[in-house]
């Protein structure tokens, strides 16, 4: 299951390579879980790759059902600026977090 793989990547501080919304991206996963509608969500730091907004690196919130070509990548160190491990307004039921 994708949520389990993402949770494992968070616990082991590994990047995730994925296709999302038009292109391949590399992200550092920080928190995953479920939104109020039960949708699987990933809060991550977008390191490189496709970006429609052109803002990178920066924070992103991805829906798991829109991810494709998912794979685990390299190890990363620590959290990124402005990360709040106590509260994520979008993710109501946390599965894993840094």
Image (cartoon, grey):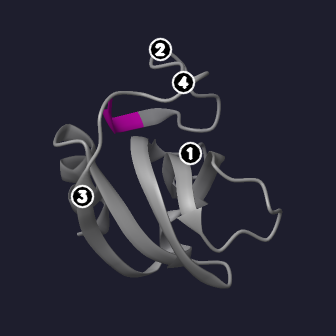
- The residue identified by callout 4 is 83
Judged by depth in the image, the label closer to the viewer, 1 or 3, is 3
Q: CA distance from mark 4 to mark 1?
A: 18 Å
Which of disc 2 and disc 3 is earlier in sequence?
3
Q: Is residue 82 left or right of residue 55?
A: left
Q: What is the crowding at mark 2: few (fewer than 14 residues within 10 Å), some, or many (at least 20)?
A: few
Q: CA distance from mark 1 to mark 3?
A: 27 Å
User: Which quadrant holds the C terminus?
Assistant: top left
Judged by depth in the image, the label closer to the viewer, 3 or 4, is 3
Residue closest to the eye, 94 or 9: 9
Q: Secondary structure at mark 4?
A: loop
Which of disc 3 and disc 1 is earlier in sequence?
1
Judged by depth in the image, the label closer to the viewer, 1 or 2, is 2
- The residue identified by callout 3 is 74
List x then y, in percent, for residue 2.
29, 68
Q: Is residue 98 above or below residue 18?
A: above
Which of disc 1 and disc 4 is earlier in sequence?
1
- Examine the image and state in which quarter residue 4 appears: bottom left
């Amino acid at each position: 299951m994708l949520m389990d793989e993402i949770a494992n990547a968070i616990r082991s501080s590994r990047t995730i390579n994925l296709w999302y919304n038009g292109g391949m991206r590399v992200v550092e996963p920080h928190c995953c879980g479920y939104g109020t509608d039960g949708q699987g969500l990933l809060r991550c730091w977008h390191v490189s790759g496709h970006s429609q907004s052109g803002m990178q690196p920066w924070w992103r919130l991805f829906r798991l059902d829109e991810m494709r070509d998912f794979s685990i990548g390299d190890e990363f160190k620590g959290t990124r600026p402005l990360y709040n491990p106590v509260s994520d307004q979008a993710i109501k039921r946390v599965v894993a977090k840094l």
